[in-house]
């Protein structure tokens, strides 16, 4: 009888073990190892899953079961997430892709470099006099292939922005592109494609800034 009372008291006080199910996309090995260490040090029970992160999720998000209690546990998870480089953690009882959790379980979704995942690393000039190629590097730099032109890129809300500065004393030039997903007809039939149409039409000193950009996917 005494054992039953102890178990009941434990359940009512929230001392049952919470399990954190981790979904990750784009984490490098170092970040992953650091996260495991941070969670272990904070005595957070966790397991990694092989399931994909929903496309609508970005950065760091924690989905919890309704009426979840345990501010200390939530605080430990947030501290671990911030310790590995995420600025904030969004916590919600709701979800957008049917990822529901029962009491005692929670889902942690971590995404790094979502823009890199959405963009190809090589784009080709389109509607342009010259055949040019643009290389997008994962760390936010770009280069016009076969030239000395290089700079920084940013992708937000379906817009790609390229920035180039001739030197540190000069004002930077920018070109902004709007993204469109569509299909194009090829010798192998219709293929999915992305076209980035330049918004600023005034001539720029960087050759590829004066061209639209396009990529055609094999599948």
Image (cartoon, rainbow, N blue to C red):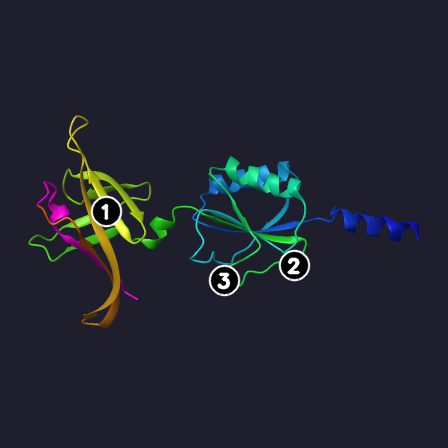
- Residue beneath the point at 6% across and 54% down: 129
Q: Is residue 2 found left or right of 207 in the rendered image?
A: right
Residue underneath mark 3: 97
Task: Judge whether 157 appears above or below 174 on screen.
Answer: below
Residue 120 seen by the camera: no
Q: Which numbered mark, 3 or 1, is in the foreground of this view?
A: 3
Q: Could you say whether the residue bearing mark 2 is in a helix, strand or loop?
A: loop
For label 3, count other residues whose C-alpha is less than 10 Å away and answer few (under 14), some (14-19) or many (20+): few
For label 1, count other residues whose C-alpha is less than 10 Å away and answer few (under 14), some (14-19) or many (20+): some
Q: Earlier in the sequence, mark 2 or mark 3?
A: 3
Of residues 158 and 43, which is closer to you in this image?
158
- Residue beneath the point at 61% across and 39% down: 75
Residue underneath mark 1: 135
The outermost residue toward the top is 169
Q: Earlier in the sequence, mark 3 or mark 1?
A: 3
Of residues 100 and 194, which is closer to you in this image?
100
Number of dots carrying numbers: 3
């Amino acid at each position: 009888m005494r054992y039953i009372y102890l178990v009941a008291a434990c359940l009512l006080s929230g001392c049952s073990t919470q399990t954190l199910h981790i979904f990750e996309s784009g984490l490098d090995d170092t970040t992953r190892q650091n996260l495991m260490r941070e969670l272990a040090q904070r005595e957070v029970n966790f397991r990694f899953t092989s399931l994909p992160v929903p496309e609508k999720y970005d950065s760091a998000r924690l989905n919890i079961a309704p009426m979840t209690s345990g501010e200390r546990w939530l605080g430990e998870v947030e501290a671990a997430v911030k310790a590995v480089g995420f600025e904030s953690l969004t916590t919600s009882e709701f979800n957008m892709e049917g990822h529901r959790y029962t009491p005692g379980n929670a889902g942690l979704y971590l995404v790094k470099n979502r823009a890199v995942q959405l963009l190809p690393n090589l784009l080709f000039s389109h509607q342009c006099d010259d055949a040019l190629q643009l290389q997008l590097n994962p760390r936010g730099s770009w280069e016009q292939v076969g030239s000395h032109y290089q700079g920084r890129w940013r992708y937000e809300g379906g817009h790609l922005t390229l920035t180039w500065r001739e030197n540190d004393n000069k004002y930077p030039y920018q070109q902004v592109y709007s993204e469109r997903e569509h299909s194009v007809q090829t010798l192998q039939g219709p293929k999915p494609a992305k076209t980035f149409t330049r918004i600023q039409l005034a001539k720029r000193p960087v050759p590829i800034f004066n061209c639209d950009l396009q990529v055609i996917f094999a599948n």
